[in-house]
Image (cartoon, grey):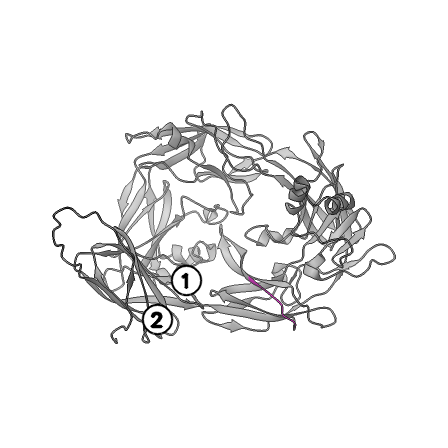
Amino acid sequence: MKAPTFVAAATLTLAVVSAAPQQQPRPTGLIVGHVVDSASGAPVPGAVVMLASTTPAGGFRVATDADGGFLFTGLSAATYTLSVTKPGYGAGAFGQRRPGGEFRLIELADGQRLADVKLLLWKHGSISGAVTDEAGEPVVGVSVRALRWAALAGRRRLVNEGNALTDDRGVYRIASLMPGDYVTMLPATHSTVPVTVYDQYWSDPSNTELRSAIFGALQAITPPGSPQSRQFGEVVLIGAAQGVVPPDPSANGLFLVVPTTFHPGAVTPAQAGTVVLGPGEHKAGADIRLAPALTARVTGTLMGPGGPMSLFPVRLIPRWADDFAGETGVEAASTLTDATGNVTFIGVTPGAYVVRATKVPRPGAVPPGSVAEPSLWAFETVTVGSQDANVRLTLRPGLRVTGRFEFDGTAPRPTAERLRQIPVMIEPVDARPVGTPPAPRPPDSDSTFGTAGVPPGRYFIRIGGPPAGWVMKSVTHEGRDLSETAVELKDDDLTGVVITFTDRPTEIRGRVRGADGAPDDTATVLIFPTDPEAWVDFGLNSGKLRSARADAGSRFTLRVLPGDYYVVAIPEESTPGWRDPKVLEPLSRHATRVRLFAGDAKVVDLTTVR
């Protein structure tokens, strides 16, 4: 490699100097390497390489030369992170072998010279297409999203990865995309506001309570007389389909709207065309053809504990939203209730929907002697055809889990203040968010806990992080182990749950070698249950599906809950989406079976499966 032609810019470190300072030897550690494109192996000039240390705190930053080379000199013995960025690429780091993969630390000894370090960068890809209406005319200024298929709790879900507006030709281009399978979508949410609320807002826009209610339900509100605001009876339709203004209603009061549409002209994700994007690829032709559809109304009432609920946000969500990682941004319609709790959605195209109304208390401390504000929820399913539909919603308190902490071991028991900081979460089995934060506990609570309220459903009881020196041992209720067993919350709270911590973790450790018998520090070790039914609907933070990157000595350690497992080592670059059952099934045929009891510390050496 050519000698780098840049100068490292170091952070300034101040130190207290004694009255009789001694001459310290100048640090002589060195790191030298190259940045290359992951696909072609070509050098990447002009990339910014960052070397950061936490022992002591400090950092350096250099730009790669024409051959992609970089050099750091005069380094002290410390633990470092080494990362690299460049516009048009996904970020890379030392030891990282795939987009978004795990990096490794550099343990640099005094005077050590680390040469031939290779950092990988993954070039972004892009997707483009044109949006046209039913007449083939371009649709200008609308937002198109790129959604990537990913494995979530063992099921395929769509994750939003970016968006772009169409230009004056109706053309969009979504950049900065990593490799994957994508669909593109033009979302359309039709918002309605009761006429009384709409008029009150524009007559008194300084009303903060009303303003907060409106913008808690709608993205925007357009002024009277605007083409995007049209009155239909007792409600005003706001900005249908991102500025795609609906035509005037027909003689019978019905009108056409443009629904959410996927490439090429599908109205559900299952019907959408898939765009397969490789590293650095550009895929054109992901066109979207919009077609207006005849609509109906969905009306109803929303009742609360004290009667009709006014100024309450209500959403209409398509059932196909189950294919998404979350419901945010996929509403077919949104509205506010009026003073008597009436709900009115107009411009609803045929299909199956969920009408949902929720109220989540704001996170924060609960004053002594006070009770946390309850969560409220209401939802009903509705099928819309050519006729109007009606629903009746009744808000109910969210369901909670309460219980106590216990400790099994000799490690110092956490203080009462630390106990209050342990977040206990009710995690949906499908890993899709329910919008409820962990509930704060009163300052005078001891080892008891109570979660926030959630709608009925199947959940896991999990913690956000154990106290120092402890790991979670079990979650039990009336003698039944719920550590990795979902509970069905229906009508009543679940009380008397015991979460036990132990200072004797259950773990498996060992070394990884390649097929040639040499240590393999490029592998990742996976552990997952032998029961295939546990490969789906395991929530977001399962204690039984874990991974660990082999360290510089090819060693690994994994902490899990007791159980029967498969354990296997695979190349790090092969790990994206490994929690997908379609990936786990073939891996299980090459894996080692192991049974772990509580407190076990087993040693298993593995050979990387390629």
What's drawn in magenta, residue-wise? 163-168
Q: Residue at x 65, y 41 (%)?
A: 208
445 in magenta: no
In terms of image quadrants, where is residue 448? top left
* Total number of numbered discs in the rendering: 2
| Tags 2 and 1 touching, CB below 8 Å | no
Residue located beneath label 1 in the image: 99
- The one nearer the camera, 570 or 218, is 218
Instruction: Identify residue type, mark 2.
Output: Val
Residue located beneath label 2 in the image: 36
The residue lying furthest to the front in this view is 19
Number of the front mark, 2 or 1: 2
Measured from the top left, where is residue 100 in percent x and y? 41, 59
Q: Residue at x 60, y 66 (%)?
A: 273
In terms of image quadrants, where is residue 110? bottom left
| Above or below, 387 relative to 357 | below
